[in-house]
Amino acid sequence: MSTQELKLEYVKIYSVGDVTRFEDVAVPMKDADYAPPAPPIAVSPHKPATGTVAVGFPPGWSGDFHPGPKRQWMIITSGTLEIGTSDGEKRKLPTGTIAFLEDAGSKGHTTRVIGAESSILMVTEVD
């Protein structure tokens, strides 16, 4: 696979009014001199951020409907989460999943840790 074919794939959780939904997104990446003198690599469009935090959930943790506190990227670094949206869909998101939450101001989503492993997320907040 050439770098011209690479895409950043993530799950978007968003709201239309008070209803939250999932959307699968694939963002094309373009070759760029990102870290010279290394050869060009595939790079996604630049997105500004306001802060980064790690959050952890113990096995068995479950949260009823709640919106994300702000627009944020999440990368699941360990464990598996089950996320539910208010339209009734649920998805299992394993380690390595990238998600973008923009459901602030809505009913939000549910979150539940699946399995016996804690779940750790790196969260990057955006405006």
Image (tube, rainbow, N blue to C red):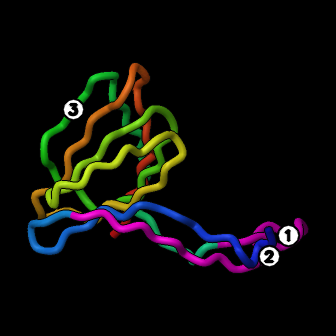
Q: Amino acid at mark 1?
A: Pro
Q: Residue 113 location in percent, x, y? A: 32, 32
Would you say residue 7 sits in the magenta stretch? Answer: no
Q: Residue 108 location in percent, x, y? A: 16, 56
Q: Secondary structure at mark 2?
A: loop
How far apart, in angstroms, are the residues tagged by discs 2 and 1?
6 Å
Range covered by the magenta-colored residues:
21-43
Give the crowd class for mark 1: few <14, some 14-19, many >=20 residues within 10 Å. few
Q: Residue 66 location in percent, x, y? A: 15, 49
State left or right for residue 55 relative to residue 27.
Answer: left
Is the C-beta separation of discs 1 and 3 under 8 Å?
no
Q: Residue 89 location in percent, x, y? A: 24, 55
Q: Name the disc covering residue 33, or none.
A: 2
Label 3 or label 2, whichever comes before in sequence order:
2
User: Residue 115 falls in which quadrant of the image?
Assistant: top left
Quickly name the residue at label 3.
Answer: 62
**Residue at position x 47%, y 41% in the image:** 94
* Image quadrant in which the N terminus is located: bottom right
**Residue at position x 13%, y 47% in the image:** 65
How far apart, in angstroms, are the residues tagged by discs 1 and 3?
45 Å
Residue at the extreme front of the image, as rendered: 89
Q: Secondary structure at mark 1?
A: loop
- In this rendered view, identify the residue nearer to me: 37 or 74: 74
How far apart, in angstroms, are the residues tagged by discs 3 and 2?
43 Å
User: Residue 80 falls in which quadrant of the image?
Assistant: top left
User: Residue 59 falls in which quadrant of the image?
Assistant: top left
Look at the picture and state if 15 lies above or below 94. below
Label 1 or label 3, whichever comes before in sequence order:
1
Quickly name the residue at label 1.
Answer: 36
Q: Amino acid at mark 3?
A: Ser
Is the C-beta separation of discs 2 and 1 under 8 Å?
yes
Would you say residue 34 sits in the magenta stretch? Answer: yes
